[in-house]
Image (cartoon, helix red, strand yellow):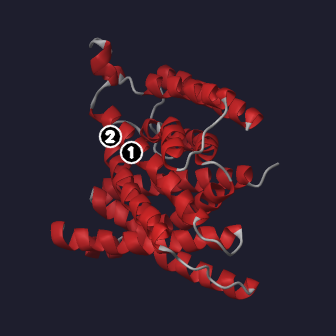
Amino acid sequence: MDAWIPVTLLAAFSQAMRFGLQKQLKATSLSTAGATFARFVYSAPLVALGVLIYAQVTGQDFPTIKPVFWAYALAGGAAQIIATMCVVSLFSYRNFAVGITFKKTEVLMSVFVGLVILGEGVTGLALGAILIGLVGVLLLSDPPEASTDPWFKRIWNRAAGLGLLSGLLFALSGVTYRGASLSLETGDVFLRATLTLACVTAAQTVAMAVYLRLREQGEIGRVVRAWRVAALVGVTSMIGSTCWFVAFTLFTVAYVKALGQVELLFSLGLTVFVFREKVSRRELQGGAFLLVSILVLILVA
């Protein structure tokens, strides 16, 4: 089994857990921006410490960072912040599993973003599998309470818009993170990936802190007071982000994102067993299409 596959599976599991914790923060104590900030402020120190320890233990020097690295890294960091806020906001409109599934439009978008920015495409069979997954997303985008409305109102609604925007921005962040990591000319895969992650999370923490200080007075203090859950958000974010960055460095982003749809299974488990939310037949049908897409991609990748 190629290394990127188990790394991606761990990333998907950690990300599902992190979004579940952020949903709890959003529902109980923090704003959308505060719940997003919790992800960065509690993970950035852990990531920085981890990369320093790894470089020391392995005896590697840090690679030279060129301007192109910062162009990729900062663009990806900004896109990821906005995308995360979209997903956290989305939880107010639909249940947890459906919110995560809307986000999965990033898989199809990663194909086109990767082709435009890095010149990396996918095979015809892989594209077919991704389109099967898109059918599942469209099924899940149809809110049951609006079943008597015209089809375009059922598909094009605020929840779908937030999900689609988050998908585009997550696709952009994944591709630019891969570009940043590949621009580093020395160091092994793990060092390059974690150094990229450390730089990105540090910049994101500063940017979010400035935003909250200017726009949401007192929210930073609430994030600090919610440290019991927020710290878990940081830990799961560190694990998940590290695995994503390593996977992006190892393999084409579109394939990594596509396999990462297995996160849906973990999200469905959280929806049913933790949040005690119901899953409709339509949502199960959409999930089935996504699972078929995942299996086909594993076979053809």
Name the quadrant of the C terminus: top right
- Check disc 1 and give the amino acid type: Ser
Q: Nearer the viewer, residue 120 or 147?
A: 120
Q: Nearer the viewer, residue 23 or 44?
A: 44
Residue at (62, 41) in percent of width and height: 262
Relative to 131, say whether 67 is above or below.
Answer: below
Residue contact between numbered discs 2 and 1, judged by CB atoms under 8 Å = yes
* Identity, as a three-letter code, of the amino acid under mark 2: Leu
Q: Position of residue 218 (x, y in %)?
A: 20, 73
Secondary structure of the residue carrying numbered label 2: helix
Label disc, if present, on residue 166 of the rendered structure: 1
Residue 47 visible, this angle: yes
In the picture, the disc for residue 284 is: none
Residue 32 in the image: state x and y as whole percent. 29, 56
- Characterize the local packing of mark 2: few (<14), some (14-19) or many (20 or more) Cα atoms within 10 angstroms: many
Q: Can you say whether 12 is above or below 105 in the image?
A: below
Judge left or right: residue 208 versus residue 188.
Answer: left
